[in-house]
Amino acid sequence: MEDKAVELQFITHFTDTYSYYDSARMALEGGCRWIQLRMKDTPVDKVEREAIRLQRLCKDYEATFIIDDHVEFVKKIHADGVHLGKKDMPVTEARKILGKEFIIGGTANTFDDVKMHYEAGADYIGCGPFRFTTTKKNLSPILGLEGYRSIIQQMRKADIHLPIVAIGGITLEDIPSIMETGVTGIALSGTILRAENPVAETKRIMNL
């Protein structure tokens, strides 16, 4: 992943106001170049339809397109990669299916999670939650700034080098202090979509 002041990943979310497609389009218009399609508890055919539309959109913006969970489908349409939550397919198994040409991200809440994903061959870690968030069910323990500092410190001691993307209830105001912990980037969803102007909000975050 290329270095920027803030490496921003946008996680799609469906709201009363915006569709998954709209949410991704606004983040892309605001300058974000990493989209993750996340449609938990949705029939596969609906996920596939949405994924094909979003893949075209991401190509137009030369953005990285990641799909949450659906490993076989990622391979089928040749998306850029997959993100695997704690209850999804293990990273080792996904790597066997996808080979080295696809990006694989894994969700982590502890240093042990990070170490496990690192040893399994993950390309990046979605680490959180930073604080309570309503966009995800069955939350793991809240990390806060201290949690990130501790994980980054343990990674350095163990000589583990993996991009760490903070996620979970993060607001614009939180970003500078979170980045100071040593994480690589930030993943957002609700913060952008709840803004009065999501495109402008994305631009503000990208310009931090």
Image (tube, helix red, strand yellow):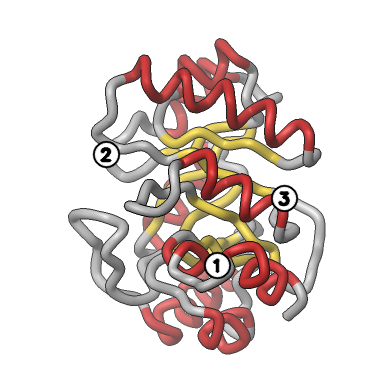
The residues tagged by marks 3 and 2 sit, at their Cα atoms, a distance apart of: 27 Å
Residue at image coords 75%, 58%: 31
The amino acid type of the residue labelled 1 equals Met
| Residue for badge 2 | 87
For the residue pair 109 and 200, the one nearer the viewer reads as 200
- Residue at image position (64%, 18%) is 78
Is residue 67 shown left or right of residue 34? Answer: left
- The Cα–Cα distance between marks 1 and 3, rounded to whole angstroms, is 26 Å
Q: Which mark sits nearer the N-terminus, 1 or 3?
A: 3
Query: For this rendering, which residue is in front, 33 or 143?
Result: 33
Q: In this image, 80 relative to 67: left or right? A: right
Q: Are marks 3 and 2 in contact (CB under 8 Å)?
A: no
Location of the C terminus (image quadrant): bottom right
Coordinates of residue 68 in the picture (x, y in percent): 44, 36
The x, y position of residue 54, in whole percent, is 59, 31
Horizontal and vertical percent position of residue 93: 43, 23
The secondary structure type at the circle numbered 1 is: helix
Q: Which mark is residue 12?
A: none
Q: Who is closer to the viewer here, 171 or 84?
A: 171
Residues packed near mark 2 inside 10 Å, few (<14), some (14 to 19) or many (20 plus): few
**Residue highlighted by disc 3:** 33
Q: Helix or strand or loop: what does disc 3 sit on? A: loop
Q: Amino acid at mark 2?
A: Lys
